[in-house]
């Protein structure tokens, strides 16, 4: 189905999110978003519970319907084959410096296998992804990896089938009701094409809720909207 394929493509952002990218900000994290999180790695403290695939789909559908939105909600069963293909595809991307590629692909297959997932399309390019893991160690490892990426991968290159893209990333100030909030922006340049992406993520227990946006007209407004959406989804999940 055309819409399912489109949502699967948007899941690329979710796969990158679960591999760890950006910086972390939580109760013990530095106050400024631009400050590296290496000195304080917050650990989710809520009761570790993996939400079922049905729980994730239900939460996204409830928030969508409450808002009067029309975006497609795609469940785990439909996304699973595409999620696995995307993870495999990332293995074929050459990322330099090498340490950046190692951080992206670290235990990626295991993370994919252990996660339940659901995606809601916001528009042609933007989506919200929920990943809920078997245990909190995946979240803890991701936050630790994020701190390393802030230090070592603010600038990097990606090569796919001979085509080279350059990327720069920076942290973005954001706050949600989740135990840990992570936000970053990136600019990817491929030839004459320049894409600016934002990813805002909230981590609680074993769950990562991420909003991915491309070329927002109002970046501050887009971040604020993402924060609100994450809070609403988190509240819906906590009803389970």
Image (cartoon, rainbow, N blue to C red):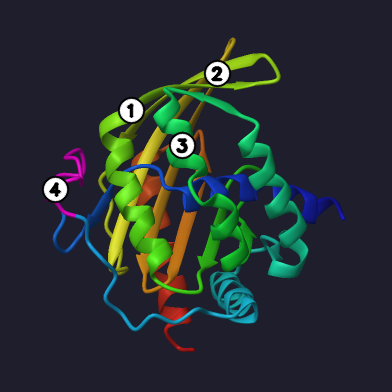
Q: What x and y, as percent, mark residue 191?
A: 59, 10
Q: Position of residue 169 (x, y in %)?
A: 37, 30
State which mark lies toward you, 3 or 1: 3
Could you tell me which secondary element the residue under label 2 belongs to?
Answer: strand
Numbered disc 1: secondary structure: loop
Q: Earlier in the sequence, mark 2 or mark 1?
A: 1
Magenta span: 30-40
Chain-order first, disc 3 or disc 1? 3
Pointer 2 local density, CA inside 10 Å: few below 14, some 14–19, many at least 20:
some
Judged from the image, the secondary structure of the residue bearing numbered disc 4 is loop
Q: Nearer the viewer, mark 4 or mark 1?
A: 4
Residue 71: within the magenta? no
Q: Residue at x 37, y 46 (%)?
A: 221
Question: In the drawing, does residue 122 fall left or right of residue 79?
Answer: left
Q: Quadrant of the N terminus?
A: bottom right
**Disc 3 residue crowd, few under 14, some 14–19, many 20+, Cα 10 Å:** some
Give the distance between the C-alpha atoms of the residues marked 3 and 2, in whole angstroms. Answer: 18 Å
Residue corresponding to mark 1? 154
The tag on residue 33 is: none
Q: CA distance from mark 2 to mark 1?
A: 14 Å
Q: Which mark is residue 39?
A: 4
The answer to if 34 sits in the magenta stretch is yes
**195 in relation to 142, above or below:** above
Q: Label 2 belongs to which residue?
A: 165
Mark earlier in primary sequence (3, 2):
3
Q: Which residue is mark 3?
A: 102
Horizontally, is 30 left or right of 126 in the view?
Answer: left
Q: Along the line of sight, which residue is nearer the eye, 166 or 48?
A: 48
Instruction: Give the mark nearer the N terminus: 2 vs 4.
Output: 4
**Viewer-proximal residue, 218 or 84?**
84
Horizontal and vertical percent for residue 145?
35, 47
């Amino acid at each position: 189905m055309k819409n399912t394929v489109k949502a699967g493509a948007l899941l690329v952002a979710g796969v990158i999110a679960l591999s760890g990218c950006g910086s972390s900000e939580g109760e013990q994290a530095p106050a400024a978003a631009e400050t590296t999180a290496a000195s304080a790695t917050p650990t989710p403290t809520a009761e570790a519970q993996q939400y079922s695939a049905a729980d994730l789909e239900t939460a996204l559908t409830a928030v969508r319907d409450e808002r009067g939105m029309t975006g497609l909600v795609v469940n785990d069963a439909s996304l699973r084959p595409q999620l696995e293909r995307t993870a495999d595809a990332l293995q074929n991307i050459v990322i330099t410096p090498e340490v950046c590629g190692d951080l992206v692909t670290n235990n990626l297959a295991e993370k994919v296998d252990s996660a339940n997932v659901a995606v809601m399309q916001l528009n042609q390019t933007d989506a919200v992804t929920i990943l809920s893991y078997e245990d909190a160690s995946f979240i803890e490892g991701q936050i630790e990896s994020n701190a390393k990426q802030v230090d070592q991968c603010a600038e990097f290159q990606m090569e796919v089938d001979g085509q080279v893209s350059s990327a720069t990333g920076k942290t973005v100030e954001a706050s949600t009701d989740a135990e840990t909030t992570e936000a970053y922006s990136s600019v990817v340049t491929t030839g004459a094409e320049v894409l600016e992406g934002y990813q805002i993520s909230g981590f609680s227990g074993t769950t990562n809720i991420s909003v991915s946006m491309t070329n927002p007209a109002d970046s501050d407004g887009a971040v604020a909207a993402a924060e609100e959406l994450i809070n609403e989804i988190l509240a819906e999940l906590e009803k389970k």
